[in-house]
Amino acid sequence: MAPVAASDWGFAQSYALDGWEVHATTRTPGDPGALGEIAGNVSIHGLEVRDQAQISALSEVFEGRGLDVLIHSAGVLRGVTRDEMRAINADAPFDVVEALMPAVLRGRDRKIVILSSQMGARNGGRTPSADYGASKCLLNDRFRDLGPHWRSDGVCAVVFHPGWVSSDMGGASAPVSVTESVSGMRQVIDGLEARSSGKFLTWKGTEHPW
Ligand SMILES: NC(=O)c1ccc[n+]([C@@H]2O[C@H](COP(=O)([O-])OP(=O)(O)OC[C@H]3O[C@@H](n4cnc5c(N)ncnc54)[C@H](OP(=O)(O)O)[C@@H]3O)[C@@H](O)[C@H]2O)c1
């Protein structure tokens, strides 16, 4: 049935090319940019991930329907306050998942993927001091709290470090292209099984330390 690629062109294109019904989100649905150029069965929805009304409106799209793979990619590295970064990177993924969970439970695959970062790992047990790393660390902590509950409901959920990717965030000098990163994560997502649930994985499928 339907995967959601929350604000990520690469995932939307990859699933659309494989013939999936894709529901992609952006804050600017009237001016979707590259998302709007993807060929295939792609619907575009407006979503500011801090806006509960927009999250509810998105969940209504799936009223009575199944959502096979939910991918939450939205994140921010700079240009916002510490509180805004925390709201976008660490709070919003769980608000979106909570609202869409009934649709995921109706889905065939029951997979949830959230993009985190290696910056959210505690090297040597220390919480990162920079806002971005601290927000991704909080995301990882919450995932570790909630993941087991999702798993007991039959959902397979993972968080990813997507690599250092040459997106707007990663910049042109990043060594991994969006296509390479997404293709690596797609292989992992396609093969996900219940025993993988709760893991922090790299785009190459290896486990990342927390
Ligand atoms: N690029 C890297 O090297 C790298 C490394 C580690 C982790 N990550 C993580 O991977 C994920 C994707 O990053 P990226 O490289 O694709 O970043 P990007 O090029 O900066 O794109 C960020 C995406 O997040 C969406 N977004 C940002 N704030 C939002 C908000 N308040 N509400 C809804 N959507 C919002 C944007 O959607 P619209 O502008 O379309 O609304 C945009 O598509 C992020 O979670 C990031 O932290 C990236």
Image (cartoon, rainbow, N blue to C red):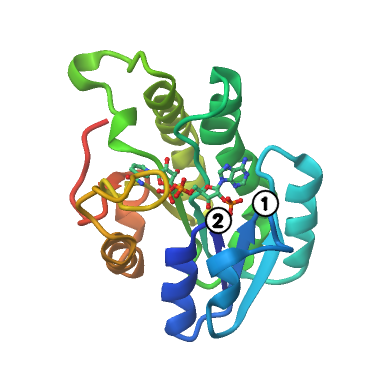
Label 1 sits on a secondary structure element that is loop
Q: Position of residue 121 (x, y in %)?
A: 28, 28
Residue 1 visible in the shown view: no
Queried on whether the Cβ of the residue with tag 2 lies below 8 angstroms from ligand 1, the answer reads: yes
Q: Front-most of 177 and 94?
A: 177
Residue at the (52%, 31%) spot, across then down: 90
Circle 2 Cα neighbour tier, 10 Å, few/some/many (<14 / 14–19 / ≥20): many
The residue that disc 2 covers is: 7
Q: Does the residue tagged 1 have its C-beta within 8 Å of any atom of ligand 1?
A: yes
Q: Which residue is mark 1?
A: 27
Q: Nearer the viewer, residue 33 or 94?
A: 33
Q: Is residue 56 above or below residue 200?
A: below
Give residue 104's position: percent from left, percent from top. 59, 61
Q: Nearer the viewer, residue 3 or 34?
A: 34
Judge whether 38 appears above or below 11 on screen. below
Figure label count: 2
Residue 179 in sight from this viewpoint: yes
Query: Seen in the image, is 95 located left or right of residue 18?
Result: right
Q: Are marks 1 and 2 in contact (CB under 8 Å)?
A: yes
Task: Say which residue appears at 74% left-offset and 57% top-offset.
Answer: 59
Q: Quadrant of residue 144?
A: top left
- What amino acid type should be assigned to the residue bearing mark 1? Arg
Report x, y in % for residue 143: 45, 36
